[in-house]
Amino acid sequence: MELSSPAQKSIVADFLLSLNSNPHTDAITVKPSVNQWWNTVQTYMKKAGQKQTHVSLSTQLSDHNCTIGKTLKKSQISELAHRVNPASSGGLTLVLTAPDVAVEGFCNEQTAGFTTRTRRSDSVFIWVGNSATQCPGQCAWPFPPNPSTDPKTPPLVAPNADVGMDGMVVNIATLLAVTVTNPFATGTIWGRLRRRLEVASACTGVYGKGAYPGYAGELLVDSSSGASYNAVGREWEEVPLARFVRSLHLLSVRPLCDR
């Protein structure tokens, strides 16, 4: 199985391009928007004296034949990233794996992705796996229920009718925020219970007002499809995005972890 259909690729591409501000469409775009969410990240960057980011899509490759196999070690993800960016010319490389590709630590560590620096340069890459057939309750939450979560809550309808891909968007968004604000894992802060936190881990699992473990919070619901979301991208793509800390209110919603 491949992450190769035009529809699946467009879900990711549209989300990434939705991060950018567009003065020609922002005034008429339905709110809340993906760009509003990303502006929260930009606020952190501005406070740190860094320039704002602009997202553009560069080289895109598909390894349809899974040339290094379907059971990968984390180190092999770096090899795949290097294929896309062989000159190690900086920038951010995104490696996405299909539902039938197993990556070291996938599901067992309850993670659908990671971000790291390449050996050769200051280039950074993100890996995110499609968990649709492996562990959707853990890594595509909040769409399918998590079997270990109590109390049980009903599953949500995925905005793009693709649990695996919509789950990937959630994880891509989280890791993008972490990577842009802390690319080399040197900027963590101490949180409660002496836990190291990054920008997207302070309110893990909080997507709307009133969230608690096992419940994502109050979300918007599409009247025609019944899909749950909390941000709208370009072409009206609906996506779920995690909340940030209270000091930077996102869409005037106060995350549970800061109440």
Image (spheres, rainbow, N blue to C red):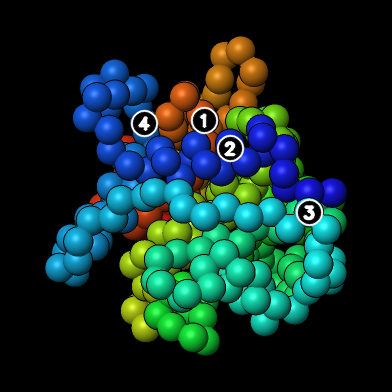
Quarter where residue 10 is shown = top right
Q: Is residue 203 above or below residue 190?
A: above
Please say whether residue 109 is visible from this viewpoint. yes
Say whether disc 1 or disc 2 marks the residue closer to the N-terminus. 2
Say whether disc 4 or disc 1 marks the residue closer to the N-terminus. 4
The residue at the point 42 percent across, 41 percent down is 17
Mark 1 and mark 3: Cα distance apart in space: 28 Å
Identified by mark 2, the residue type is: Ile
Side of 243 relative to 126 (left or right):
left
Q: Position of residue 33 (x, y in %)?
A: 37, 33
Mark 3 or 2: in front is 3
Q: Is residue 2 above or below residue 194?
A: above
Closer to us: 8 or 237: 8
The reply to whether dot 3 and dot 2 touch (C-beta < 8 Å) is: no
Q: Which residue was labeled with disc 3? A: 64
Q: Position of residue 114 (x, y in %)?
A: 58, 69
Secondary structure at numbered mark 3:
loop
Say whether disc 1 or disc 3 marks the residue closer to the N-terminus. 3
Say whether disc 2 or disc 4 marks the residue closer to the N-terminus. 2
Mark 4 and mark 1: Cα distance apart in space: 10 Å
Q: Which residue was labeled with disc 2? A: 11
